[in-house]
Amino acid sequence: MRSQVNRLAPEEACGLLAGKGNRVEKILRVPNAERSPVRYRMEPRAQWSAFQRIEADGLDLVAIYHSHPNGPDHLSPADVSEIMYPVAQIIWFRMNGEWQVRGFQVEGGKTNEIFFEFIP
Amino acid sequence: MDEHRSLPEPTRISVLTAAVLLAFAMTRVLSATHLFSLSIPLGVLKVSLAINLNTIIVLLAAGVTATGIDWLLHTHPALKKGATLEHWLLPTLTVLVIGVALYSLPTTSIWWLGFGLGAVIFLVVSLAEYVAVDPQDGRYPLATAILTVIAFIIFLILAVALKSVHSRLIWVVPALFLAGVLAALRILHLRLSEHWEFSWSVGIGLVAAQLCAALHYLPLTPVRFGLALLAPLYALTVLAANLVQAVPFRRAFIEPAFMLFLFWGLAIWFK
């Protein structure tokens, strides 16, 4: 994910995280159809193929990620209003030139930060 | 007895219903022993279908239904020679769909409710098909209405059941395409004085399948998913019947358009 968001900056990058339960097992990169530094919209065909891949591997959608190359370090109001899938939202953002990541769960219009760890 | 008010032989319909119900019940009693898997590579996707004893039982029950309905109808005094195909399409589809729906339910009181409801639907569809053999029968319009409603209900049950068990798109699309084609084919055959409308039926099935593929990955509840797919099936079937019957263009569109938006409205409203 880090290499993808870094490579595509200053445009926003996005993708899906698939796994079982709360454990992510697969990263599926999806092109940003907007190719914008402030917005993202997954390219529909690639998103559809990614969902088919998840289904074929017997996994579930666990989270959706995208980057904010120019901040903020949290979900923007547009992000919150456009959430369609009730899964965790992962935000990559830059702080002092370094990529950082935070996770959020939106339930009933309320955004809560979630914590996770990378298991090599 | 009025020659246009015949009923099926009680023995035959009892035997047929009992055989189908026994098959449904056996899927609960026998363990779903895995027999073999069909694995088909499709490009980057690997499609595999696990066949177990219950799958075989449901398929056999559908086969028994097709032959059983044919056997049942042969006692009908108004039956033309060899003309029973249209009468066993819907009962066979009914058994397949109820079998799939019951298979996906856990053994709780809801399963028993589904079992009872399935028995009633099967009995009603069998009786209605028997009555529908004779267009001169005074109960023919009622039988036609019942068969039409059941065809739509069966499609809805299948869509809801497949979404509930998170079936893969690769199975959901062909299953709903086939169910849509068969439902539309039977309804149009009834509405159009026993005239087969294959092109309209396949077109309606394709629309249902296309919409199914588009909605499959959206986080919709099973009921919303089912209603969203039932809407075009209903609207296009009624529209096809109206257009084939040369109903004036504007009038032909009013009911289908109204029902399309009613079902979609229900799908949006229904949680």
Image (cartoon, rainbow, N blue to C red):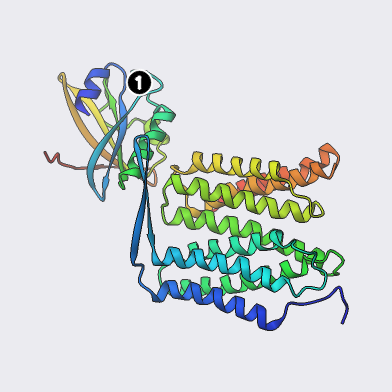
Q: 10 Å neighbourhood of mark 1: few (<14), some, or many (≥20)?
A: some
* Residue B3: percent from left, percent from top: 87, 76
The residue positioned farthest toward the front in the image shown: B81
Q: Is residue B12 left or right of residue B24?
A: right
Q: Which of the 4 image quadrants contains residue A36?
A: top left
Left or right for B239, reference B103: right
**Residue A71: x and y, percent?**
27, 23
Residue A90, picture quadrant = top left
The vertical placement of B256 against B18, above or below, is above
Q: How many marks?
A: 1
What residue does disc 1 label?
A38
Q: In the image shown, does B254 or A113 lie closer to the viewer? A: B254
Describe residue B157's horizontal placement relative to residue B202 as left or right: left
Q: Residue at x 48, y 62 (%)?
A: B100
Residue B71 position within the rendered picture, expressed as x and y whole percent measured from the top left:
67, 72
Residue at image position (53%, 53%) is B159
Q: Compared with residue B121, is residue A99 higher up or lower down, i.e. above or below?
A: above
Question: Residue lying farthest top?
Answer: A10
Q: Type of residue at label 1?
A: Val
Is disc 1 placed on a helix, strand or loop?
loop
Residue A80 lies in what quarter of the image?
A: top left
Q: Chain of mark 1?
A: A
Q: Residue at x 66, y 63 (%)?
A: B88
In the picture, the quarter occupied by the N terminus of chain B is bottom right
Q: Is residue B133 visible?
A: yes
Q: Position of residue B47 (x, y in %)?
A: 37, 45
The image shows residue A93, relative to residue B219, as above or below, that is: above
Looking at the image, can residue A111 be seen?
Answer: no
At 51% across and 56% down in the image, what residue appears? B160
